Image: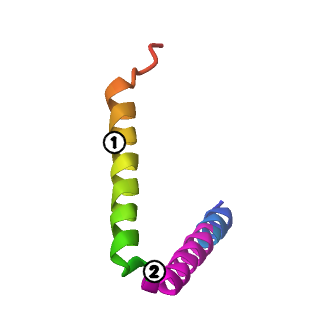
């Protein structure tokens, strides 16, 4: 059981580490585009729309009754 737990933990840590390396690498490649003012405004607007969407989902969420 301990070996299974350790293997699962190492697998999870490897996947998460790989994901963060990928995100950092892609972010560094896209950094010059993010510094452009018009693209920055567009990304801020997109992020705002996503936040509003999730806020609306939270407000209208009804827990299932068991």
Which of label 2 and label 1 is nearer to you?
2
Q: Who comes first in sequence, dot 2 or dot 1?
A: 2
Task: Tell me the magenta residue range.
Answer: 12-32
In front here: 5 or 33?
33
Q: Is residue 22 left or right of residue 3?
A: left
Q: Write the residue at 52% across / 75% down.
A: 23
Q: Residue 5: within the magenta?
A: no
In front here: 39 or 13?
39
Mark 2 secondary-structure assignment: helix
Q: Write the residue at 37% across / 47% down.
A: 49
Q: Quadrant of residue 8?
A: bottom right
x and y percent of residue 40 in the render? 35, 70
Q: Quadrant of residue 9?
A: bottom right
Mark 1 secondary-structure assignment: helix
Q: Quadrant of residue 3?
A: bottom right
x and y percent of residue 42 in the render? 39, 62
Q: Is the residue marked by circle 1 packed among few (<14), some (14-19), or many (20+) residues within 10 Å? A: few
x and y percent of residue 27 in the render? 48, 79
> Mark 1 = which residue?
52
Looking at the image, residue 66 lies above or below residue 43 = above
Q: Write the residue at 62% across / 70% down.
A: 15
Q: Residue 15: within the magenta?
A: yes
x and y percent of residue 16 in the render? 55, 70
> Mark 2 = which residue?
33
Residue furthest front in the image: 38
Q: Are marks 2 and 1 in contact (CB under 8 Å)?
A: no
Q: Is residue 53 left or right of residue 9?
A: left
Magenta: main secondary structure = helix
Quadrant containing the N terminus in the rendered view? bottom right
Checking the image for residue 13, the label placed there is none
């Amino acid at each position: 059981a301990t070996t299974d737990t350790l293997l699962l933990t190492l697998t999870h840590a490897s996947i998460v580490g790989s994901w963060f390396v990928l995100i950092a690498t892609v972010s560094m490649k896209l950094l010059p585009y993010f510094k452009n003012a018009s693209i920055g405004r567009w990304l801020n607007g997109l992020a705002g729309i996503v936040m509003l969407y999730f806020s609306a989902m939270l407000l209208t969420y009804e827990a299932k009754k068991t």
